[in-house]
Amino acid sequence: MKPLKPSARPLRASLAWIGHTRSAPRLLADVVTSFEDSDDFLLAPNAFDFDFYVVQLAQRGVRGIDLVRLIRRRSPAGIVALGDAAQNDFVAALDSGADMVLPPDAPTDHLVAAIAAVRRRLHTPSTGTPRPWTLLEAHAALQAPDGTQIPLSESDLAIMGCFADAEGGKVERRVLMERLWGTDTEHGSTENALHATVYRLRKRIEQAGQALVPVHAVARVGYEFRAPLVRA
């Protein structure tokens, strides 16, 4: 494999490679997770928590174009699609939310350069300060930056309270489980319950009309709220 050019450096984060028609180059990111197909990906508990996605549009299961659309609805992460322009994949992938489309046989240095270009665009500082999310504990609600108030269940409120306490930091699974069910719970049984509880919170925010849901899993740690959050 030829060396990477100085302008094409690996992504210093996590990347999901979705598709079986080609192996994922390990040089693309610090952590590269490969999924055999779209079904395998969608069954993963952290499917929408990666920092970047490479999606092969030729998929078994859910169509690649539809998979790009699903990822874009749930994540602001960069997406590079691999598709055949002769089959009209180019326009369809961009319309569905991909940031860039490359041929399926694009060399590794092209992929690395494309990922770097998308990351530069995503991380360009904005001119304004984003409005925060607001936890309205007295009203058991979460207010989105657009002013929408999202009613919270008791468990939702407990999780959001942990995020507010963390002040932008990561919250360990143990902390969340103890806040939800106390210290006398069995670790194994509550892991799945915690995942289901966080999933319901994510769905509640999404169904309130929010394009991006800031609740994300953190591998080997727990969860975090990737947006400014204040109490009121």
Image: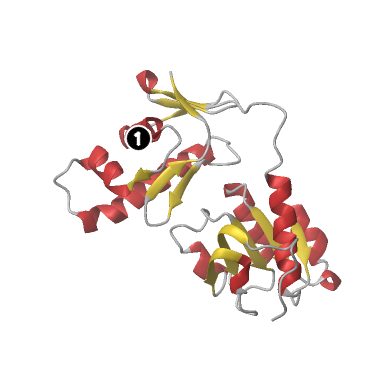
Corner quadrant of residue 5 = bottom right
Residue at image location 62% in from the left, 51% down from the top: 77
Query: From the viewer's perspective, is residue 25 above or below residue 70?
Result: below
Is 230 on the left or on the right of 84, as rendered?
left
Is 176 on the left or on the right of 56, as rendered?
left
Q: Please name the amino acid that badge 1 sits on.
A: Cys
Corner quadrant of residue 130 = top right
Q: Position of residue 190 (x, y in %)?
A: 25, 52
* Quarter of the figure that contains the N terminus: bottom right
Q: Position of residue 175 (x, y in %)?
A: 28, 42
Corner quadrant of residue 69 = bottom right
For label 1, count other residues whose C-alpha is less than 10 Å away and answer few (under 14), some (14-19) or many (20+): many
Is 64 on the left or on the right of 138, as rendered?
right
Q: Residue furthest left?
A: 184
Which element carries disc 1, helix, strand or loop?
A: helix
Residue at image location 50% in from the left, 37% down from the top: 205
Residue wearing tag 1: 162
Q: Position of residue 64 (x, y in %)?
A: 66, 66
- Label tally: 1
Q: Residue furthest right?
A: 86
Query: From the viewer's perspective, is residue 89 above or below residue 163?
Result: below
For residue 82, say whether it is visible.
no
Residue at image location 42% in from the left, 32% down from the top: 167
* Quarter of the figure that contains the C terminus: top left
Colour scheme employed for the rendering of this structure? secondary structure
Q: Position of residue 151 (x, y in %)?
A: 43, 28
